[in-house]
Image (spheres, rainbow, N blue to C red):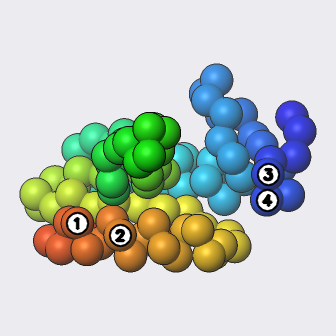
Amino acid sequence: MGWGKYHNRKVVIDGITFDSQREGDYYCELKMLRMAGEVIDFERQVTFELQPKFKHSGKTERAIKYIADFVVKYKDGRTVVVDVKGDKTDVYRIKRKMLLYKHPDMTFEEV
């Protein structure tokens, strides 16, 4: 596997390509928590629209989206949006703020 855009080495686990070893390790941890019954289920690469696409001066501007690494549902009823972070880019920081502003009741974790 090659290097990712932030110099992370991509890894493949269960036929799924992850952007980093850290993200792949977290996936394995979630699988174990699901087998233990602590986690009911989880999804990968969940998209949240932060701002819809729009037209300005005849030009279409693309929507702004945040893609969460995981959305985890726990047996106690909690749902947690998880981002597995290495470097926190300026774009990430802005999108994270927009996400939390749009979803003030969201439980968000960086690991």
Q: Residue 71 at x, y = what percent? A: 33, 50
Q: Are marks 4 and 3 in contact (CB under 8 Å)?
A: yes
Checking the image for residue 6, the label placed there is 4
Q: Are marks 3 and 1 in contact (CB under 8 Å)?
A: no
* Amino acid bearing label 4: Tyr
Q: Quadrant of residue 40?
A: top left
Rounded to the nearest angstrom, the CA distance separating label 3 from label 1 is 27 Å
Count every numbered label the image shows and give the total. 4
Local crowd size for mark 3, using a 10 Å CA cut-off: few (<14), some (14–19), many (≥20): few
Q: Residue 108 at x, y = what percent? A: 33, 70
Q: Are marks 4 and 1 in contact (CB under 8 Å)?
A: no
Local crowd size for mark 2, using a 10 Å CA cut-off: few (<14), some (14–19), many (≥20): some
Relative to 28, is 10 on the left or the right? Answer: right
Q: Which residue is mark 2?
A: 98
Residue 29 visible in the current orientation: yes
Q: Which residue is mark 1?
A: 102
Q: Quadrant of residue 58?
A: top left
Q: Which residue is mark 3?
A: 5
Q: Residue 23 at x, y = what percent? A: 61, 53
Relative to 81, is 7 on the left or the right? Answer: right
Residue 46 visible in the current orientation: no
Q: Earlier in the sequence, mark 4 or mark 2?
A: 4
Q: Is residue 28 above or below residue 86?
A: above
Which residue corresponds to the image point at 71% horizontal and 52% vertical from the top-left? 20
* Amino acid bearing label 1: Lys
Rounded to the nearest angstrom, the CA distance separating label 4 from label 1 is 27 Å
Q: Are marks 2 and 3 in contact (CB under 8 Å)?
A: no
Judge depth for marks 4 and 2 and give the one in front: 2
Q: Residue 88 at x, y = what percent? A: 63, 75
Q: Are marks 1 and 2 in contact (CB under 8 Å)?
A: yes
Which residue is outermost to the top?
Answer: 15
Which residue is outermost to the right?
Answer: 2
